[in-house]
Image: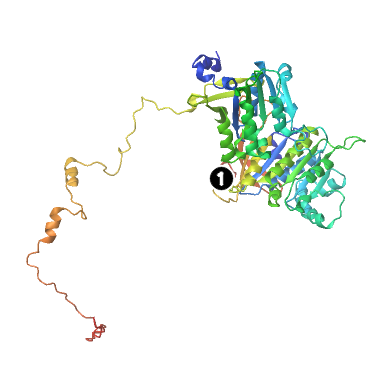
Amino acid sequence: MFVELNNLLNTTPDRAEQGKLTLLCDAKTDGSFLVHHFLSFYLKANCKVCFVALFQSFSHYNIVGQKLGVNLTVARERGQLVFLEGLKSAVDVFFQTQEEPHPLQFLREANAGNLKPLFEFVREALKPVDGGEARWTYPVLLVDDLSVLLSLGVGAVAVLDFIHYCRATVCWELKGNMVILVHDSGDVEDEENNILLNGVSHQSHLILRAEGLATGFCRDVHGQLRILWRRPSQPTAQRDQSLTYQYKIQDKSVSFFAKGMSPAVL
Amino acid sequence: VTLSEGARAGTGRELGMLDSLLSLGGLVLLRDSVEWEGRSLLKALVKKSALCGEQVHILGCEVSEEEFREGFDSDINNRLVYHDFFRDPLNWSKTEEALPGGPLGALRAICKRTDPGPVTIALDSLSWLLLHLPCTTLCQALHAVSHQDSCPGDSSPVGKVSVLGLLHEELHGPGPVGALSSLAQTEVTLGGTKGQASAHILCRRPRQRPTDQTQWFSILPDFSLDLQEGPSVESQPCSDPHIPPVDPTTHLTFNLHLSKKEREARDSLILPFQFSSEKQQALLRPRPGQATSHIFYEPDAYDDLDQEDPDDDLDI
């Protein structure tokens, strides 16, 4: 996890808020560093993490995780991490004989209906184990990324329903957190992605938006991060809840600075 | 006197527009966006209805009952009836707990009530309903609900029905939003500038011209509405009348001004391509003593003077 990002969000692994949905979105840049941040953050917070990884392979996340100080293999073995590797298990849908529907069952259907099997996989993974003392603090669902589901033919409303049910179970019932990544293609014509992005935005408590610089690529400033806090439990008189920072990604950390204040420029 | 009190003492009729949204009845559309969310305003209006003694029904599709009731004190919460479509709206758990008929069924059931008092129905949210139901069905249901009190021939007098619908503007195309907008008696669009929320209220009263007004407001922690004047005036730059405007043409190294003689000479100048009558005469008049022109040619050493004309054989 990136300590500077924790400072910006005013949170640490041991005193993070619960019951919150965080939306990560990236436009014209790669926002996956945020996914790696939250994965290592919640593993360090001793949470039970269900990671629906549709974009990259397990070894990719493991390699980056090791740079950030977490070992995904060990976490998976001791039951802290439930990992759905989309790229590998998509093949199992066709070759595995199963009794109950596979989480990615929608790949077999001609017109992709709903994501109920995927939701049930998540619910099964995160449900509290009764008997024995609670080993983990609270459950966390991490999804990388939701736009892949649109590309696989699932409708935007079906994906929103999946997020709704996950929110009802993970955030409300189990008092856990959710972190979802959605790409913003910036294409006005892509209605489904816009509905998905706006729909999840309206449901989120915190939106982290990584954007490429308007002026193009830069060696010292890789992009801009906009932080928007929404849905406070108490309406505040002052609605000053949006911040913007620029960042540079290094090998094991990300440094943040105010706009125009990159160390390379000063 | 706080700023809001002073404002209320001022133009009372205009500032009360946000207050009197519910008194008109019918469908009130609350249009919000990701940056300016509308649920706080919805809750503030719900609180206002409850305090007026109305019965308030909430069709909750987006947030849990606990979250919606949070911030209300117990006497308001006793008046709220929450119809829960958050936990299992699509009946994925296959239990018998699902409310029959879905949200529209619940809506019609509320309207079939027997007691004649005024009722406020809050739809949280209309966007969820619009994404899951056909637009025509939803519009017909809303029309039936909000115009119920005006249908004749009914023996029992039915009280006024107000419907508050929360609509997330970015999720829908202009067609459905336009349809809902035409059904609505009042439309409130949320926006604002840095740190200060505003509501643009468009009110369509029957047999009157639509009125619109922008109201700055904030919601207090107990969900009561605080109407405000507007963003602070100091943020707007004002020109100081004591400082004279600066003339940029002074202190230049080149001359931008013309003297009187120069100006006259410039005005009397004929432009080269302007065809005036003098020019026409000059062209028509044959020039005196014009001899045929000569070309004097000194051939170089390398020039090849071939007397034979290559075009000689052309028969034109």
Question: Picture coordinates of residue B292 (x, y %)?
Answer: 11, 72
Looking at the picture, the colour scheme in use is rainbow
Residue A153, compared with residue B310, is above or below; it is above
Quadrant (top left, top right, bottom left, bottom right) of the C terminus of chain B: bottom left
Q: Left or right of A177: which side holds B170? A: left
Question: Picture coordinates of residue B89 (x, y %)?
Answer: 75, 36
Quadrant (top left, top right, bottom left, bottom right) of the N terminus of chain B: top right
Question: Picture coordinates of residue A174 (x, y %)?
Answer: 81, 34
Q: Foreground: A11 or A39?
A: A39
Q: Residue furthest right?
A: A131
Res. B130 image quadrant: top right
Q: Left or right of B33: which side holds B109? A: right
Question: Picture coordinates of residue A35 (x, y %)?
Answer: 72, 45
The subunit carrying tag 1 is A
Residue at 53%, 16% (x, y): give it: B8
Res. A254 image quadrant: top right
Q: Residue furthest left?
A: B289
Q: Foreground: B297 or A88?
A: A88
Judging by the rendered image, the residue that carries numbered circle 1 is A265
Instruction: Examine the rendering and report whether any part of residue A69 can be seen.
Output: no
Q: How many marks?
A: 1
Residue at 71%, 44% (x, y): give it: A159
User: As shown in the figure, which amino acid type bears the numbered disc 1?
Assistant: Val
Callout 1: helix, strand or loop? loop
